[in-house]
């Protein structure tokens, strides 16, 4: 392991120990990006400084009703700094790497949304990412409690509930309906895990289990208590015939999952794997 990688892992471990409200999603995502595309502390902090400068621009240009807040945010983000959506190649993974996205000013919706959220919060705006499952949506609120839901990958276009419902049905099936939980705010770690998950799924579609496993194990540095990640890591190790690592990961899943049925099924699988090792 290089000195740079060790430093990045140490910073991720420090973030993992913080309360969720103290985690800056952009910082966590840039650290994870540095594991995939090696970068120094200076490069990571340079990207964070750029976002802080962009937030200062937005702060100087915003105020008043929520419509003006949205215009000021995306005037800087999309029109001046030219961030734009890029989902043209479903097998591309760089456009979900936050450092690459900042350098190239284009990326997948989750990456752009995470950046727009960081800029909005840095500018002092009340902003959240919605726990909407099929597309990254940003909600901002003014001093009077008026809210707008925006699509950062479409230049901050306002998204109304009928369009959200149509997006959900197109991605999840015609019987799907909007639920109250879809308007809840995503936790900070959840945003980063969602971006990592997008990269993982693209790699799996390409048959790159080894690289997808690297993504999952990197994500565990930030979210070591997320049981499902341990199960995913275990199953990928098993497919790669890394039986010892599969056993270790699945034991971590059993220790963390609250699901008794999943725990029982995994214990049966573990017994089989340990038998093969012996």
Image (cartoon, helix red, strand yellow):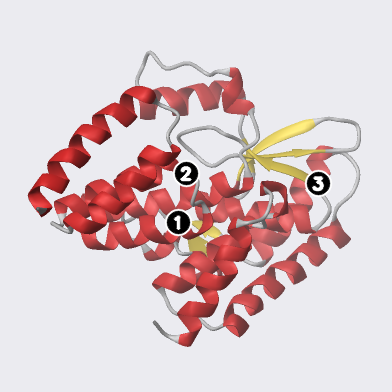
Q: Quadrant of residue 206?
A: bottom left
SS class of the residue under badge 1? helix
Q: Closer to the N terminus: mark 2 or mark 1?
A: 1
Q: Residue at x 42, y 34 (%)?
A: 257
How far apart marks 1 and 3 lie (CA) works out to 33 Å
In front: mark 2 or mark 1? 2
Q: Is residue 154 visible?
A: no
Q: CA distance from mark 2 to mark 3?
A: 35 Å
Q: Which residue is mark 3?
A: 69
* Residue 28 appears in the figure: yes
- Neighbourhood count class around disc 3 (C-alpha, 10 Å): few under 14, some 14–19, many 20 upward: many
Q: Where, by quadrant of the figure, is residue 256 drawn?
A: top left
Q: Secondary structure at mark 3?
A: helix
The quadrant of the image that shows the N terminus is bottom left
Do callouts 2 and 1 mark residues in contact (Cβ within 8 Å)? yes
Q: Residue furthest top?
A: 175
Q: Determine the residue positioned at 8% across, 49% down.
A: 276
Disc 2/disc 1 C-alpha distance (Å): 9 Å
Q: Position of residue 161 (x, y in %)?
A: 60, 23
- Drawn side of residue 247 relative to residue 3, left or right: left
- Residue placed under numbered mark 2 in the picture: 226
- In this figure, which residue is indicated by the disc labeled 1? 219
Q: Kindly indicate whether the residue at mark 3 contacts the one at mark 2 (C-beta within 8 angstroms).
A: no
Q: Which disc number belongs to residue 15? A: none
In this view, the mark in front (2 or 3): 2
Rendering coords of residue 250 (x, y %): 30, 45
């Amino acid at each position: 392991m290089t000195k740079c990688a060790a430093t990045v892992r140490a910073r991720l471990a420090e973030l993992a120990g913080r309360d969720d409200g103290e985690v800056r999603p952009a910082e966590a995502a840039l650290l994870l990006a540095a594991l995939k595309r090696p970068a120094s502390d200076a490069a990571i902090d340079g990207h964070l400084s750029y976002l802080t400068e962009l937030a200062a621009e937005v702060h100087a240009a915003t105020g008043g009703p929520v419509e003006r807040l949205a215009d000021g945010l995306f005037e800087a983000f999309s029109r001046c700094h030219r961030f734009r959506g890029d989902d043209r190649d479903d097998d591309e993974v760089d456009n979900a790497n936050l450092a690459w996205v900042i350098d190239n000013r284009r990326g997948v919706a989750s990456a752009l949304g995470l950046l727009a959220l960081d800029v909005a919060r840095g500018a002092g705006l009340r902003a959240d990412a919605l726990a909407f499952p099929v597309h990254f949506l940003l909600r901002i609120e003014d001093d009077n409690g008026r809210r707008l839901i925006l699509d950062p990958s479409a230049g901050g276009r306002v998204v109304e509930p009928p369009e959200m419902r149509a997006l959900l049905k197109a991605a999840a099936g015609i019987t799907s309906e909007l639920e109250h939980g879809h308007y809840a705010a995503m936790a900070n770690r959840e945003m980063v895990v969602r971006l990592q998950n997008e990269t993982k799924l693209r790699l799996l579609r390409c048959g790159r289990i080894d690289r997808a496993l690297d993504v999952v194990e990197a994500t565990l540095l930030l979210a070591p208590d997320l049981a499902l990640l341990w199960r995913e890591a275990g199953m990928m190790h098993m497919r790669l015939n890394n039986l010892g690592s599969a056993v270790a990961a699945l034991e971590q899943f059993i220790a963390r999952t609250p699901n008794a049925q999943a725990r029982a099924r995994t214990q049966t699988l573990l017994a089989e794997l340990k038998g093969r090792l012996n």
